[in-house]
Amino acid sequence: MTLRKNDIANILFDLGSPLLGVLLPTISLLLSTSVPSQPMAASVTAQTVAQLLSFATSSPAAFKEAAGKLDTSTRELLEQSIRRAVGGSAAASSQQASKPQISLRSF
């Protein structure tokens, strides 16, 4: 069974913080403090972070409440993983945007 984004949003809306209070610590077990070097581990980490971002965007208040109840090390691991994933894509797009360009002016 595959959950669609709307299904997840409805479940989070109905159950909110208590559900995320169970899911966030469980999901954090799939993350590591360093960038995974093996392709399979990198894929699992990417999918895990994508799911975390989905939870955070679907129900921000419940996500914030549940994350606030996590122990410090787990919360920092979630934050670090999300920042690394979001920062990595932002850094790549900013590198493309900041490439030197030649502008031709007509006089």
Image (cartoon, helix red, strand yellow):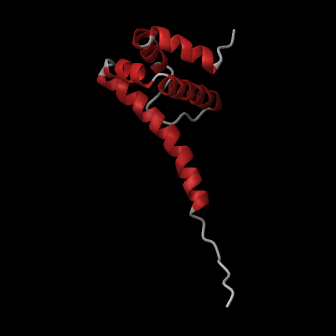
| Horizontal side, residue 16 vs residue 94: left or right | left
50 on left or right of 32: right
In the picture shown, does residue 20 fall above or below 95? above
Comparing 39 with 58, the one in front is 58
Circle count: 0
Relative vertical location of residue 35 with respect to residue 10 in this rendering, above or below: below
Quadrant in the picture for the C terminus: bottom right
Residue 80: percent from the left, percent from the top?
42, 35
* Furthest residue toward bottom: 107
Residue appearing at x 65%, y 18% in the figure: 4
| Residue 100 found in image quarter | bottom right
Looking at the picture, how far across and down is residue 5, in whole percent?
A: 62, 21
Could you tell me which residue is drawn at 41 percent across and 19 percent down?
62
Quadrant assignment for the N terminus: top right
Q: Position of residue 7 (x, y in %)?
A: 61, 14
Give me the residue at 59% from left, 25% from top: 44
Occupied quadrant, residue 105 = bottom right
63 or 92: nearer the viewer: 63
The picture quadrant where one finds residue 28 is top left
User: What is the x, y in percent for residue 3?
Assistant: 65, 14
Could you tell whether 7 is left or right of 77 in the image? right
Residue at 54 percent across and 33 percent down: it is 36
